[in-house]
Each structure stands twice: as structure tokens, then as C-alpha cells.
Amino acid sequence: MATERDPNRVYYRAGGFEQSRPILKGADATETFNFIPIVDVSNVFSPDLQVRKKLAAEIGKAVTEVGFFYAVNPPVEIKLMGM
């Protein structure tokens, strides 16, 4: 027999186990995101320090606000990526 779920909780699987957390409301709620940030990392090895600082700030903003991002245009050969 399935157990009844609390409608005030979010259920998910982590580490192979079902877990839950309360749904945050009011002052406890945090803002969510509408899209996953896309960061062009082609300049990661730029000789220009200001270009690298700008990229670092963009990555920092993405991981602070969303927690992750899509990295596009990495300066790595496709064959090294196993594709």
C-alpha cells in the first residue's frame, strides 16, 4: 500500500533513496530561474586578463543564481571530448 504524500512537501530521489523537503512559501521562499544560463567559454585561455575576469564574473553569476550553466564553445578538440 502506497503512503499518502504531504502536499506541502517536494519529493525527489537522491542517493538512491526517496527524500523530501518542505515547499518554501512566503518569506522563506527563494526565487527560481526560468532558464539555464549559457556561457561561451571560448575565451577561457585569453591572454587578456580583463576578458578572463569578465568570463569569471559571468560564470560566478550563473552558479550563484542558478547553480549550474551550459558551457559552449570550449577551446578543446572534439576528439578529446569523446564525441
Image (cartoon, rainbow, N blue to C red):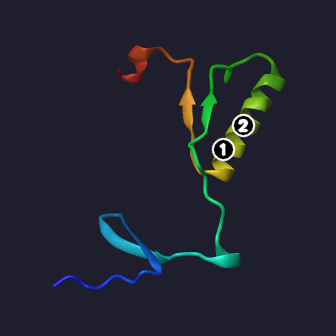
Mark 2: few, some, or many residues within 10 Å (few <14, many ≥20)? some
Judge whether 13 appears above or below 82 on screen. below
Image quadrant where residue 56 sits: top right
Image disc number at residue 48: none
| Quadrant where the C terminus is found in the figure | top left
Residue at the image point whose x is 41% and y is 23% from the top: 81
Residue at the image point whose x is 68% and y is 51% from the top: 64
Q: Look at label 1 and name its amino acid.
A: Ala
Residue 21 position, x and y percent, is 48, 76
* Secondary element type, mark 2: helix
Mark 1: few, some, or many residues within 10 Å (few <14, many ≥20)? some
Residue at the image point whose x is 71% and y is 43% from the top: 60
The front one of 24 and 50 is 24
Residue 3 position, x and y percent, is 25, 85
* Secondary element type, mark 1: helix
Residue 45 position, x and y percent, is 68, 20
The front one of 43 and 6 is 6
Judge whether 25 appears above or below 52 on screen. below
In the image: residue 22, left or right of residue 13:
right
In the image: residue 2, left or right of residue 24:
left
Which residue in the structure is indicated by mark 2? 58
Image quadrant where residue 19 sits: bottom left
| CB under 8 Å between discs 1 and 2 | yes
Between marks 1 and 2, how big is the CA–CA gap?
6 Å
Judge whether 46 appears above or below 54 on screen. above
Residue 35 position, x and y percent, is 57, 44
| Quadrant where the N terminus is found in the figure | bottom left
Q: Look at label 2 and name its amino acid.
A: Glu
Residue at the image point whose x is 66% and y is 61% from the top: 31
The total number of labels drawn is 2
Which residue in the structure is indicated by mark 1? 62
The front one of 28 and 61 is 28
